[in-house]
Amino acid sequence: MTRAFPDGFLFGAATAAYQIEGAAFDDGRTASIWDAFTRIPGAIVGGDDGDVACDHYRRYADDVALMKSLGLQTYRFSVSWARVRPDGGAVNSAGIDFYSRLVDELLAADILPWLTLYHWDLPQALQEKGGWVSRDTAERFVDYAASLHDALGDRVKVWTTLNEPWCASFLGHTGGEHAPGHTSVAEGLLASHHLLLAHGGAVRELRGRDASLDLGITLNHTVADPADPQNAGDVDAARRVDGQFNRWFLDPIHRASYPADIVEDIRAVDPAAVDAFEAAVHDGDLTAIAQPIDTQGVNYYHGDLVSGTRQEHPPVGGGPATTRPGRSPYPSFEGIHPVERGLPRTAQNWEIQPEGLTRLLQRVWDEYARPAGVRLFITENGAAFDDAVSVENGEKRVHDADRTDYLRAHLAAVLDAVDTGVDVRGYFAWSLMDNFEWSWGYDKRFGIVRVDYDTQERTVKDSGREYARIIAARSL
Ligand code: BG6
């Protein structure tokens, strides 16, 4: 039985600047925290960096032609702050010109540009002034948003402020696995607040410039289930994962408050960190954060089954991405234990749990988006698998059946949510092409298009062919 997607449902693919652009120091771009972080020995699998990546900075026109050939209706990309405002300072017209050309190319191909202002690459010069731990960075972000709107506002109508502030805050400042690589609970909390202030400030600035813009934020989520729903310890572990991962951002954005239970959990393990956080939350901040938005982006990769007691088998999910001495990115992690439930896993050991996406969409819709009149999009979903290239009749092929199944199963999960009344307006595959996967370097491939990093040749994988077929048919 075929299942049709709703009228107007948008199909796209997503990337991020540091992961694909390369040209890391060209045309006036200066270092970002990821340029600095990738230089730390042991920080990235294989010692990889984004200096060249997919060379998209030079190949953008070919890449847009590839998007067109897949039938993409929209393309979600991010902008490098250090290209647009090197060192976070004055506007660099050469850097802005790149995005202007990209947007023109997309529009000429009839592909809707979906712009993300921040996908984790803070100018290193701002990091040296305190980065997201400093309140001032939120103001610099608003200046940056304004300068980009000056240049692109006539052509770009969909603006996402931040991608996954949980990662930028807690993976970057508490777990140490992402740039800037710090391991402090207090820094994670302060960074999260200042990122949210940056979001609210940019929404207000952009809204004031053009009330017709579609403005939003993208959050990453997990669906945390208790190993035994009858066991109070397991239920509490699931509450804490949900609170630290999902509600820490959903609540301030949609309800102008931080989750009080999580604040208290963290106070129990690090009271000084919570004191610093509470001192940083000024009167009026939560109202400034909870600006009305139009769109919420939902990123979903995997679920989590958790217990309050250590299980007999070693925990398997996620696992440290690198050889760095990482810490838990959850400020209050004691007593949360991952549990194996025998689901298939990706090459990163992430659980494949499409049904979690249905429940996630229902929950975000019922509790947050519907009451606020906010539209939902899946702004990232995808999987890393180890691909093999074959040559058939002189043509390169990648038979990535695992990724194709993942894509189809998650699109079906979206339709399951739609069937129960959730208003989901679109889906972006992560990722358009293989790229620099942060602490995993080039070791993990998420693309529906393969990239040969020696030649920069692009090969549409079977998953990309299947996605193109689904887009053309508008049904599964
Ligand atoms: C999301 C990010 O968290 O997950 C992407 O927004 C990222 O930028 C993707 O590439 C996959 O995660 P990772 O850690 O494998 O790069």
Image (tube, helix red, strand yellow):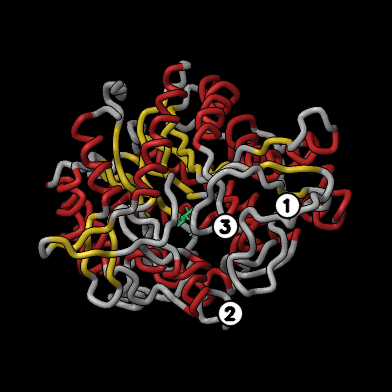
Q: Is mark 2 within 8 Å of ligand 1?
A: no
Where residue 436 appears, x then y in whole percent? 41, 66
Q: CA distance from mark 2 to mark 3?
A: 19 Å
Q: CA distance from mark 2 to mark 1?
A: 33 Å
In the image, which disc is placed on residue 280?
1
What amino acid is found at the position of numbered circle 2 in the picture? Gly
Q: Nearer the viewer, mark 3 or mark 1?
A: 3
Query: Residue tagged by mark 3?
Result: 168
Where residue 444 appears, x then y in whole percent? 44, 64
In front of the other: 215 or 175: 175
Where residue 149 appears, x then y in whole percent? 33, 49
Q: Is residue 86 above or below residue 165?
A: below
N-term-proximal mark, 2 vs 1? 2
Side of 30 where 308 appears, left or right: right
Query: Residue tagged by mark 2?
Result: 42
What amino acid is found at the position of numbered circle 3 in the picture? Ala
Q: Is mark 3 within 8 Å of ligand 1?
A: no
In front of the other: 16 or 201: 16
Q: Nearer the viewer, mark 2 or mark 3?
A: 2
Q: Is residue 316 above or below residue 212?
A: below
Question: Do labels 2 and 1 touch, CB within 8 Å?
Answer: no
Helix, strand or loop at disc 1? helix
- Judge whether residue 269 can be spotted in this image: yes
